[in-house]
Amino acid sequence: MHVQVIDGANGFVGSHLAAALLARGDDVIALARASTEVVRRRVTDALLCLGFEESLVDRLRVRGLALNKPDLGLPAAEVFAERCTYWHTAALVTFFPRREEELQDVNVTGSANALATFERHARPESRYIHIGTAYQCGLDSDGPVPEDWPAQAPPDRFRNSYEHSKREAEIALSRSRSVREGNVLVPRLGVMVGHSQTGRALTDYGLYDFLRVMAFFARRTPGERVRLPCHPDANLHLTPIDTTVSRLLSLTAENREQPVFHVVNGGTVPVRDLFAVINAWLPIELVPATPEEIQEKPFNRFEAVVNMRAKYTAIYFQHHYDFAWRDMAAPPAVTLPVLDRLVSWYVREGLPE
């Protein structure tokens, strides 16, 4: 029997991955710090989001996870009783400052503990899959970011400590016995968003954090014009959860010599298109502006406040990203109709009252 073990199974990617594997008929063990009730609810929501029967959750086995404890606090003999694929999706995702220590504890030390636990207990021919981010490239993004192991870089070469922590985790992984034995796969994801066909999103991170901030100001002071600093060719690699999970399953269907893959779209979303769709659904006018334009005409008070509130996510509008990718790993591009579904669903259904 081949078992699928997923840590961070209550998270956005982890819960949808568990749902897709259950629907495929796999034996799934969900590891999470959250309670069994919470994990089952999250996976049930993911099953419904992906169009599967919610009763499939009855087959899910849930076990507690502690990234800072020996053997992750697991009943290791049970979890690793059979040959498995171990999915390391657990991570702290935050762009806010002064959380460097927590990011280090979860994303670097915790990841190392997950790998060490796998190496101690996993049966022969088991595989370890580390879910990374394409944005671990930091500010070193001139030309296509290659699909290979990263080099060490100081913290000031990253937009935030989250990116730095994900880079450090990959570097530690690259030096492991599992990599030398060819048992590791590292899919680097783009900006995770909701379902490509319905727009439904079970997350408040990334794009949705930005939408939440814009909606707050749009509803409070409708009709205002807001400039945001943007690269002239600013773009985002938005990757819907349904097509991303599908690509992850296809990537792991066979052994591959190269361990690192960018699971990003070949076609990106220009930020100007994102702003146009947001403007159509919220009473606000977002305008991309170059630093030179802002220097020539500084922000008014309202613009300054909005930019301050959005700065941790809007910093991604100030760059153009180009990632090496292969057809076998690339989900379909997010078209304008898909982008409209993603934004409109969140405006109608996802925003707080």
Image (tube, rainbow, N blue to C red):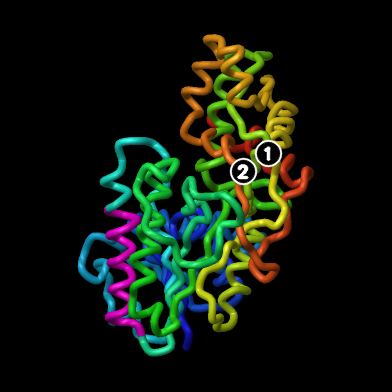
- Residue 107 is inside the magenta segment: yes
Tell me which segment is drawn in magenta. Answer: 105-122
Residue corresponding to mark 2: 320
Q: Is residue 48 visible?
A: no
Q: Is residue 265 or residue 59 the one in the foreground? A: 265
Mark number displayed over residue 233? 1
The amino acid pointed to by label 1 is: Asp
Residue at image location 31% in from the left, 79% down from the top: 119
Q: Secondary structure at mark 1?
A: loop
Residue at image location 69% in from the left, 21% down from the top: 285
Residue at image location 52% in from the left, 46% down from the top: 203
Rendering coords of residue 115 (x, y %): 33, 71
CB contact under 8 Å: marks 2 and 1: yes
Q: Secondary structure at mark 2?
A: loop
Instruction: Give the alpha-carbon distance from disc 2 to disc 1, as whole Å.
Output: 6 Å
Rendered view: 138 above or below 251 = above
Q: Is residue 284 or residue 109 the one in the foreground? A: 109
Q: Is residue 11 left or right of residue 34?
A: right
Rendering coords of residue 302 (x, y %): 55, 12
The quadrant in which residue 52 appears is bottom right
Which part of the image, by quadrant, shows the C terminus? top right
Rendering coords of residue 2 (x, y %): 48, 85
Q: Does the magenta stretch mainly form a helix, a strand or a loop?
A: helix
Rendering coords of residue 308 (x, y %): 47, 23
Q: Earlier in the sequence, mark 2 or mark 1?
A: 1
Q: Is residue 204 visible?
A: yes
